Amino acid sequence: MVKQIFLFFLLLFIPHNLNLTNAIPSNVTLLTLGDLWETRGMIRTHLFPTKTSTVYPEFAAIPSHQGDGRMHLTRAALDKAIENVAEMNGVLIHSVCSYRHLNVTFYTLNTMFGIGRSEVLIDANMTEMERKMSEMTDRRIKVNFICVGANNDTYSAVWHHSPDFVWHFIVDSGPIREIIEKDRLQMTRGYYADCFQTYRNDNISRAIIIWRKGFGKKYRIQYGTEVNEMLTDMQRTDLEPVQFASLPRWILWHGDEFTWGNRTIPRDLSKMEHNWEALNLVIEHRMRSYDIPSISIHILRDNKMEYSASYGFADILQAIPVKTSHRYRIASVSKLVTAMTIGELLADYNHIDLLTPVFGPAGILHDVCSPCHPFLLHVRIIHLLEHSSGAWPHTSKFEFDRMEQNQTEFLMRVVQKEFPILFPGGRHMYSNIGYILLGRIIEKVSGRSYEEYALEKVLEPLGVNATIGKEGDPSEEVTYYSHDNANAYTSWSTRRLNSAAGWAMTAEDVTKVFHHLEEHKLRRFRWIITPSAVRWNYGRGVQLGNDGSLYHIGSLAGTEAIGYTWQNVQVAILTNIRGKEQNEQTGWMEKLCRSIADGRFTR
């Protein structure tokens, strides 16, 4: 059916005397108006005007496996062509661009295979474009391409109404240098350039770009002066050209999204007396099944390292192999660190205890709300620790709102505007905000930052080198990814969620924290592992297994993690991705920890 549609489209647009085989370029080719005069188009090829001349138009012909290109269309012919495409099933408009020839505006039209329908805006000014873009974004309709008009003061855009999942996208324009700088940042955040067009305005070289959320998709925005030299430079890559822009020459190249497939997964393994290949294979099978960029695991037995290994890439675009020394965000595993730090705070400052009020005139955070909701006057420190405050459940996702606000502004807004659901102490409602408030309590009482106090009192004595918000160097901390639209760098902030989910550390460091818990669970940390009054399998910052194990899982955009202890065995498993669903890997991690503790892999 699709082939029939494609042939129909060709018969509609392409003259019968065109040599179809010879018309398909093997790479980017520059063609003149004279080269295309008879055919006025090419099959399996997209055509982009270079705008280097208004007298002798030039076109970049780029191979396309799923569409063809048409050029030198008048506005009337373009409108008719758009109508014809709309009547076809399985064909969408890819892009519409314009150019000038002898003081007349002409258009190129590129098509592609796809399900749904196209919506096109032609020769709109900036105000019209921004209004339409806002409308379509609110309706979650994908913008496919934007082209600057022939006179550099109008824009043509194509949107696709499709049942397919719409990846998050960002549209921006500005001086080329600024756009290229922003592109480097967006690349680290998991976006790739899907549309890149250049133009001149007020004697400034500018660009308009669409970044789309992807998963490790390779791409390059290449600059050069001679097309042949640019193509030669890219011969040894696995990228293909997808777009061409002028000023003087820019080519956008795309590769495939990341997948392990049959690729070898790099390993960084410790040398131990046991053969751990069975565990290696279990982990690598999981990585291939879910395309997990990296996993780091550390096992302690009798307070000695039994095994330590990391698999995959710390950064998949740069192909940096992960090491056991790489830090990972540990998400909600951070809550155990905060609970331990609260214990140190109570020991250092005798005027507070677990039953000290949090809000109200006598509360530690008396300045956060005044007046407070009546229920909040009954919230105690212990309620925050065991998630029984009756307020701010994580299902409401308040902690991800208004990321531009600093933590103080954010907490005051949430506490004053988002009223409690239940009276404190009556029900378990998991709350990240409750643990953010615990961090603020630590700061208020100690007069120091949460991070400083936790490092000095809990982590540094254990030899743990942990950080909050220090990501950016892939040689020390992994790069984070997600299979969905959630962004590990913009959807949430490690600074805001510092005491709830902000710590980053190695897998070895996580096992040190859990060994510390195991070692002192019967005396110093008995209050942490005691089941709360509202949930039998959760203490204060730790989850309680029915077999006596103690653990905590973490899952936020960019990471899933577990810290685990059972008697004399401690295990940490960390990843630098979260799947399409929250906690996609944590159930598997917990089962694997139990198997390791049982000695399954050392028998």
Image (tube, rainbow, N blue to C red):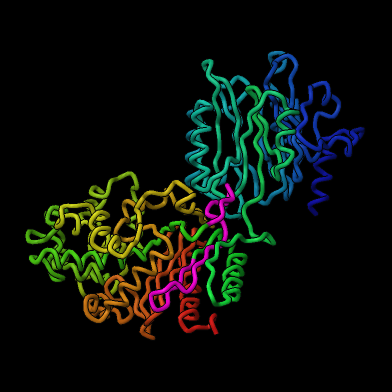
Residue 423 quadrant: bottom left
Q: Residue at x 38, y 49 (%)?
A: 470
Quarter of the picture containing the C terminus is: bottom right
Closer-to-camera residue (476/485): 476
Q: Residue at x 67, y 35 (%)?
A: 243
109 with respect to 385 (left or right):
right
9 with respect to 258 (left or right):
right
Closer-to-camera residue (160/555): 555
Magenta region: 297-322
Total of numbered circles in the picture?
Answer: 0
Q: Can I make out residue 224 in this image? A: yes
Q: Main secondary structure of the magenta part?
A: strand
134 with respect to 253 (left or right):
left
Q: Residue at x 23, y 62 (%)?
A: 457
Eyeballing the image, is 506 above or below 80?
Answer: below
Q: Can I make out residue 158 in this image? A: no
Q: Position of residue 29 (x, y in %)?
A: 78, 30
Examine the structure image and report whether residue 306 is included in the region drawn in magenta: yes
Quarter of the picture containing the N terminus is: bottom right
Q: Position of residue 536 (x, y in %)?
A: 30, 82
Closer-to-camera residue (103/283): 283
Eyeballing the image, is 37 above or below 113?
Answer: above
Q: Position of residue 157 (x, y in %)?
A: 59, 35
Closer-to-camera residue (383/260): 260
360 with respect to 335 (left or right):
left
